[in-house]
Amino acid sequence: MITIQKYSEKDKIAENQKKEIVKFLFEHLEQYGDPQGDIAAAVNYSLGYQNKPGGTIVTATHQNNQSLVGAVVLNKTGMGGYIPENILVYIATDKKLRGQGIGKLLMRNAIDSCEGDIALHCKPENPAMQLYKKLGFTTKYLEMRLKK
């Protein structure tokens, strides 16, 4: 049995919970991940630290041993209409439990928990692409970035 927990900029969570989410994402994002410092920054943004707009964090915990089995981080963009109100920054499920519907459960809860549209960036070869399409995400633009 899986328990879903939702956090936003309105919630104060313990530092150890926040670190657990960051550590989980770092471990289970694998080749699609970022350095722990970047993940921590996105989590802090979702929680509204340093006057950031906030967002939504959804976690899935296994009831038997209270271990994290999945997490999603959405950040508010502070925009709307021409740019979606939210961006999906991270989603990961426990590598040993993939294919059991945890990602879909997390995404449905994240979608229901935030207001406005959601954008995400996904490499074409990422297996999560199929989940996003099933949930109604479409490809509107090809993203390009200039790194300075």
Image: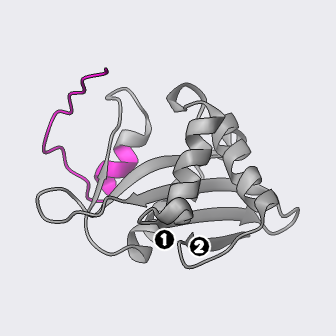
Q: Position of residue 119 (x, y in %)?
A: 28, 52
- Over which residues does the magenta segment extend? 130-148
- Between 33 and 63, the residue placed more toward the observer is 33
Identify the element where label 1 is drawn. helix
Say the numbered circle drawn on residue 49.
Answer: none
Q: Is residue 147 magenta?
A: yes
Judging by the rendered image, the residue that carries numbered circle 2 is 6
Q: Is residue 6 left or right of residue 115?
A: right
Q: Position of residue 63 (x, y in %)?
A: 80, 69
For label 1, the crowd category at 10 Å Cα-Cα, with few meaning under 14, some 14 to 19 and many 20 or more, is: some
Front of the two marks 2 and 1: 2
Q: Is residue 128 left or right of residue 12?
A: left
* Residue pictured at 73% horizontal, 43% vertical: 23
Q: Are marks 2 and 1 in contact (CB under 8 Å)?
A: yes
The amino acid beneath tag 2 is Lys
Q: Residue furthest bottom?
A: 10
Compared to residue 22, the image places residue 145 above or below, namely above
Q: Position of residue 47 (x, y in %)?
A: 56, 65
Q: Tell me where residue 148 sits by quadrant.
A: top left
The amino acid beneath tag 1 is Asn
Judging by the rendered image, the residue that carries numbered circle 1 is 109
Q: Position of residue 22 (x, y in %)?
A: 67, 47
Q: Tell me where residue 101 sits by quadrant.
A: bottom right
Identify the element where label 2 is drawn. strand
